[in-house]
Image (cartoon, grey):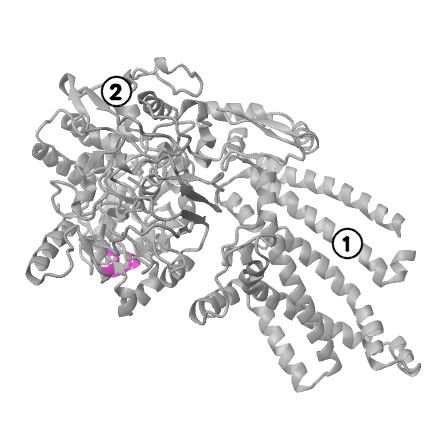
């Protein structure tokens, strides 16, 4: 999943530790229960627990959503946000601690039932759940929702698992041909039962169904295609008041047809939720501390100035959390534009990990990473260092880099383009740190910044753009789509995951060893054996110098005192937006 | 006077046509001359990285393979008669005056401009009032008290004002006036008709930041103009006739000084109405400038083209008003 996400084993460790502390000292229950406001309390427990209704919840972001069409989103914060106005077959449990990364039924009555050796998955949906206009949600609406994800020309941003996994070869989506019977990937048995038909067995299908918004029901008659994201039909606790205005914002109001009895994962506390887009990141921080904005939507933490202010002021610090956010900020090295592995090794050797670590805010900003998979992933091993040292003091190995350049046939270095998200100061600082460290061995980086809203789709996420602009490196963050090696590594390393837009395999890795292991692992039933193969893939990516590891992100999140029901959600790697309330 | 206005109006229409042709050429002819293909141009229209079929459809839709004159004809026709756009999943009507359709935001460009216009107009109008009052008053007083402490101090502040960009004074204002001292509310645009008091309060800081820059400039211009004018023969004559000093200064001195200031004011106003980009960016106000900037950042060609034309329209209109005001201020213009 793009951007802010998931908890880690270190956070899991924190849960265990806090359990112990609570048992010894009594007081707040921080084991996934509730807690009073204190530093890092929200990382593992609900802070300011309250069921008080009313008020206006104010959310802001510096850029804008990719889309508000739940099927057309891949950013974790967008998926988190869509839960306010949409429901899907399965979803992450709305609980603090590691429980939050577990998939639970949402519209479904229960998790999917596998059949035909894992090639079919059957879901029964709850009866009586309604859209905002009072119409009942039926199985055909979910089939339609899945079918429309097959038209990547219209829904360009979302994940592409369904097109990869479902047995619907040749289907082009329902926009050009509205006859849904031609879509064979999902069968509607009756109004409340649907069966997903896969090309091959896939053990983690509940996770595929639940981690994104691609099973959020869409009434076919109201689907406006590319414009649907301006006013998606609500099935959740809130609905849109008018159209969302790109780069400005919009307002959510209560959906009177949402039934809390059918939905244990969401609350409907504030009267309204106002979303403002295009507010400068530093201004958002100021307003968070003043309490006039409640939520920084991207959820990746405050900027450098606010971080210092918060960490040095005990009163502010008590309202902050510093969890391992679950995603790994790394540098993909494009294997098409820099095809020689020795040239890529030179980049990794010369990189100043210390400067890159500082760019992310030092200890408060993250941990120096070793493996590609972050610690949260089940079965992940720490891994060994290839060509670089996971050390906060490592400033690069210039001699080894020069040797690699000689082997690459470019002893004086070479030039390439590095892209970054211009509205993310940490990424800009990382790119600048890398530019300086690589210059020591003659590798010249031309830095180019692009807005977050387009970066992962049209710049780094577009192989055509990468080829045209000769992009060699980029800043990137990835968190597991779900909590296994498959959920983390497959989208960023399998050749089958390379897509025209929204491409997460930014290094465009097409390595026969890695590809072979992906083909092998889907046939393995034992999770431990699968984890072993995932770790081998992880090591191979580093050996091929296709990814320069950087930091496992820690976010410094700030929660205004007027915000209630705040907790770090392991599934999304930021606060859970679906259960918040406000006081005053 | 009516003939004078009609003459200027016709000139303005002609000028807009020329500007639209030049703008169109800049966006379509120059890139083609520089080697940009019709596919590349289509991609800019499509916004997000499209597939080959989408590019072909857009090329056909906009006639990007056709001669530039035909393309320009279609563009002007859309402005005059409106157009219909096929998004691939539905058809969207864009009534006249249609400045194009953004496939990125999925909205007609004119709708976006109209939505953002009140914000930019509010910023510009408020700041203009402030800088005119402050700039001209200080300029006149400085000229009349040439060499005094007031003059020297005012000109020093003016020099600082000219030197300090809005993004500096604006951020400083936000940090201290809003967030530290809480003297002014946060900058959130509220419509004038929605809540006039909040509209005023929330825009006061952007006005001050923008006006500080321009007031400094206008103070220096006014001072220089007044110093020159007050030494003219007709001023001496006015004084010799026994007119009160206030009348000499305001009616004769200032009036003569205003002509060049009005010229610059027209241009400044037009430019800012086309988008006070830095002010809007500094204060996160989603006006026309931000719209244009977002269009540039996202290679959203229709938005950039529409915003450019609209900015040109404002400059032409502002100059038209200035031309008319010349006639009011200086009778020689009327009679020429």
- Quadrant (top left/top right/bottom left/bottom right) for the C terminus of chain B: bottom right
List x then y, in percent, for residue A451: 43, 46
List x then y, in percent, for residue A426: 34, 55
Query: Is residue A504 placed above or below A406 in the rendered structure?
Result: above
Cα distance, mark 2 to mark 1? 69 Å
Residue A263 highlighted magenta (yes or no): no
Who's the residue at 74% across and 79% down the image? B143
Residue A365 highlighted magenta (yes or no): yes
Q: Residue furthest left?
A: A24
Local packing at callout 2 (Cα closer than 10 Å; few below 14, some 14-19, many 20+) is: some
Q: Can I make out residue A349 in this image?
A: no
Q: Which quadrant of the figure has residue A474?
A: top left
Tell me the magenta residue range: A359-366
Chain ID, mark 2: A
Chain ID, mark 1: B
List x then y, in percent, for residue B15: 75, 44
Residue A478: which disc?
none
Residue B321: which disc?
1
Q: Residue furthest bottom?
A: B148
């Amino acid at each position: 999943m793009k951007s802010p996400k998931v908890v880690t084993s270190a956070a899991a460790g924190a849960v265990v530790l806090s359990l112990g502390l609570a048992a010894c000292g009594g007081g707040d229950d921080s084991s996934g229960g509730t807690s009073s406001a204190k530093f890092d309390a929200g990382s593992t427990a609900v802070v300011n627990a309250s069921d008080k209704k009313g008020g206006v919840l104010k959310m802001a972001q510096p850029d804008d959503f990719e889309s508000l069409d739940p099927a057309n989103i891949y950013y974790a914060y967008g998926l988190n946000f869509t839960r306010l106005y949409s429901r899907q077959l399965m979803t992450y449990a709305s609980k603090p601690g590691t429980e939050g990364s577990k998939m639970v039924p949402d519209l479904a009555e229960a998790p999917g039932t596998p059949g035909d050796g894992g090639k079919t998955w059957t879901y029964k949906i709850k009866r009586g759940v309604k859209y905002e206009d009072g119409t009942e949600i039926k199985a055909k609406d979910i089939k339609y929702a899945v079918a429309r994800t097959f038209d990547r020309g219209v829904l360009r941003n979302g994940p592409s698992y369904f097109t990869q996994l479902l047995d619907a070869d040749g289907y082009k989506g329902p926009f050009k041909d509205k006859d849904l019977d031609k879509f064979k990937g999902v069968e509607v048995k009756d109004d409340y039962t649907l069966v997903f038909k896969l090309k091959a067995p896939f053990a983690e299908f509940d996770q595929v169904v639940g981690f994104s918004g691609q099973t959020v029901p869409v009434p076919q008659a109201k689907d406006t295609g590319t414009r649907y994201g301006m006013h998606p039909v609500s099935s959740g606790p809130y609905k849109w008041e008018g159209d969302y205005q790109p780069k400005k914002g919009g307002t959510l109001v209560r959906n009177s047809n949402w039934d809390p009895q059918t939905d244990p994962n969401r609350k409907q506390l504030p009267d309204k939720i106002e979303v403002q887009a295009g507010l400068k990141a530093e201004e958002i921080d100021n307003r968070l501390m003043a309490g006039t904005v409640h939520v920084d939507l991207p959820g990746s933490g405050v900027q450098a100035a606010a971080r210092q202010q918060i960490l040095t002021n005990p009163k502010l610090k008590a309202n902050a959390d510093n969890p391992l956010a679950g995603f790994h900020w790394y540098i993909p090295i494009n294997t098409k534009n820099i095809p020689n592995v020795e040239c890529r090794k030179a980049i990794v050797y010369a990189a100043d990990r210390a400067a890159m670590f500082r760019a992310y805010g030092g200890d408060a900003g993250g941990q120096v990473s070793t493996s590609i998979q972050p610690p949260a992933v089940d079965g992940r091993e720490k891994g060994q260092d290839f060509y670089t040292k996971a050390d906060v003091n490592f400033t690069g190995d210039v001699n080894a880099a020069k040797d690699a350049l000689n082997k690459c046939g470019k002893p004086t270095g070479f030039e390439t383009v590095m892209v970054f998200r211009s509205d993310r100061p940490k990424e800009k600082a990382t790119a600048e740190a890398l530019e300086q460290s690589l210059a020591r061995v003659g590798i010249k980086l031309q830095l180019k910044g692009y807005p977050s809203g387009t970066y992962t789709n049209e710049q780094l996420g577009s192989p055509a753009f990468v080829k045209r602009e000769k992009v060699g490196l980029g800043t990137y963050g990835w968190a597991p789509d779900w909590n296994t090696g498959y959920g983390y590594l497959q989208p960023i390393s399998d050749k089958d995951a390379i897509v025209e837009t929204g491409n997460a395999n930014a290094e465009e890795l097409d390595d026969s060893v890695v590809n072979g292991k992906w083909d092998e692992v889907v046939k393995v039933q034992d999770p431990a054996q699968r984890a072993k193969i995932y770790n081998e893939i992880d090591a191979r990516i580093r050996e091929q110098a296709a990814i320069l590891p950087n930091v496992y992100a820690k976010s410094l999140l700030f929660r205004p005192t007027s915000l209630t029901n705040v907790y770090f959600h392991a599934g999304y790697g930021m606060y859970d937006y679906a259960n918040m309330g406000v006081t005053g | 006077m009516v003939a004078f206005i009609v003459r200027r109006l016709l000139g303005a229409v002609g000028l807009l046509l020329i500007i639209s042709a030049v703008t169109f050429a800049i966006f379509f002819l120059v890139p083609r001359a520089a080697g940009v293909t019709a596919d590349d141009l289509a991609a800019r229209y499509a916004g997000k990285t499209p597939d080959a079929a989408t590019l072909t459809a857009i090329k056909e839709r906009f006639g990007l393979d056709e001669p530039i004159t035909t393309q320009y004809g279609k563009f002007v026709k859309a402005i005059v008669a409106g157009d219909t756009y096929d998004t691939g999943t539905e058809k969207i009507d864009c009534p006249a005056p249609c400045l194009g359709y953004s496939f990125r935001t999925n909205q007609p460009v004119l709708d976006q401009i109209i939505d953002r216009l009140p914000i930019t107009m509010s910023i510009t109008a408020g700041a203009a009032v402030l800088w005119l009052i402050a700039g001209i008053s200080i300029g006149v007083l400085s000229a009349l008290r040439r060499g005094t402490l007031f003059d020297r101090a005012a000109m020093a502040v003016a020099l600082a004002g000219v030197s300090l960009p809005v993004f500096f004074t604006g951020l400083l204002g936000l940090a201290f006036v809003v967030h530290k001292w809480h003297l002014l509310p946060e900058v959130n645009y509220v419509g004038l008709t929605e809540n006039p008091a909040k509209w005023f309060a929330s825009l006061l800081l952007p006005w001050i930041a923008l006006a500080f820059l321009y007031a400094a400039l206008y103070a220096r211009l006014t001072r220089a103009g007044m110093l020159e004018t007050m030494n003219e023969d007709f001023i001496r004559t006015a004084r010799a006739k026994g007119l009160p000093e206030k009348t000499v200064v305001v009616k004769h001195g200032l009036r003569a000084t205003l002509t060049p200031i009005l010229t610059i004011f027209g241009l400044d106003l037009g430019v800012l109405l086309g988008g006070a980009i830095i002010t809007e960016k500094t204060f996160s106000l989603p006006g026309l400038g931000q719209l244009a900037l977002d269009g540039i950042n996202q290679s959203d060609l229709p938005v950039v083209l529409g915003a450019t034309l609209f900015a040109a329209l404002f400059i032409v209109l502002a100059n038209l008003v200035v031309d008319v005001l010349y006639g009011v201020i200086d009778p020689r213009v009327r009679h020429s």
